[in-house]
Image: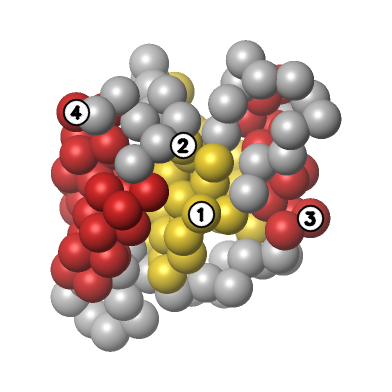
C-alpha cells in the first residue's frame, strides 16, 4: 500500500472538493480501508476524513452494511442520519437521507475500489448529486490507477 500516494491525493482532492462553504461539491467525505475478501477479524479503519468526525462504531456498522450487499432492503446511518439506497451501479451506489430537515435534501455516494470505500455526503438534489458523483469519480480514478 502506497500510503504517501493515497494521503497526497486525498489532501489535494479533499481541499478542492470537500468544504462546508458554498460552491464545493461535497459537504463531507470518508476514506475507509476495505477488504471484502479479508478475514472478519480484520477491522476496517478510517484512513482519511474531511468535513466529518466519524464514529468508528458507526463506520463499522456501515462497512458491515456494504459487505452484506442488501442495498435495496436495508438502510445505513451516518451521524444519526438514515440513508436508503436509490441507485446501484457496478462499483458505486447512491443514497438519499430519510430524516433530513433540508428542503433540497441530502445524499450520499458510496464508491468501492479494491482497497477502499469512499463515502461522500452532499446537500441538494439531482444537480448536486451529479456534481458529487463527478468529484468522487475523480478521486476514485486516482486510486484505481494504482489498483488501490
Q: Nearer the viewer, residue 143 or 97?
A: 143
Contact, mark 4 vs mark 1 (Cβ under 8 Å): no
Callouts 1 and 2 close, C-beta under 8 Å: yes
Q: Nearer the viewer, mark 1 or mark 3?
A: 1
- Crowding at dot 1, Cα within 10 Å, few <14 / some 14-19 / many 20+, comes out as some
Name the residue: 35% across, 81% down: 20
Helix, strand or loop at mark 2? strand
Question: Which disc, if any, is residue 110?
Answer: none
Q: Which residue is mark 1?
A: 47
Answer with mark 1 or mark 2, whichever residue precedes in sequence: 1
**Residue, disc 3:** 57
| Label 1 – label 2 distance at C-alpha | 9 Å
Q: Where is mark 2, residue-wise? A: 116
Residue 128 can be seen, yes or no: no
Relative side of 147 to 12, left or right:
right
Distance of mark 4 from mark 1, alpha carbons? 19 Å
Q: Position of residue 83 (x, y in %)?
A: 61, 48
> Which numbered disc flags the more N-terminal residue, 4 or 1?
1
The colour scheme used to paint the residues is secondary structure
Amino acid at each position: 500500500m502506497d500510503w504517501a500516494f493515497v494521503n497526497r491525493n486525498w489532501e489535494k482532492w479533499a481541499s478542492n472538493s470537500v468544504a462546508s462553504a458554498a460552491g464545493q461539491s461535497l459537504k463531507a467525505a470518508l476514506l475507509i480501508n476495505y477488504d471484502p475478501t479479508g478475514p472478519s477479524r480484520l477491522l476496517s479503519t478510517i484512513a482519511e476524513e474531511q468535513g466529518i468526525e466519524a464514529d468508528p462504531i458507526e463506520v463499522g456498522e456501515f462497512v458491515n452494511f456494504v459487505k452484506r450487499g442488501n442495498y435495496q432492503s436495508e438502510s445505513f446511518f451516518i451521524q444519526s442520519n438514515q440513508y436508503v439506497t436509490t441507485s446501484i451501479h457496478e462499483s458505486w451506489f447512491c443514497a438519499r437521507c430519510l430524516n433530513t430537515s433540508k428542503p433540497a435534501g441530502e445524499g450520499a455516494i458510496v464508491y468501492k475500489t479494491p482497497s477502499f470505500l469512499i463515502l461522500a455526503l452532499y446537500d441538494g438534489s439531482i444537480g448536486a448529486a451529479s456534481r458529487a458523483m463527478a468529484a468522487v469519480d475523480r478521486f476514485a480514478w486516482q486510486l484505481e490507477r494504482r489498483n488501490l
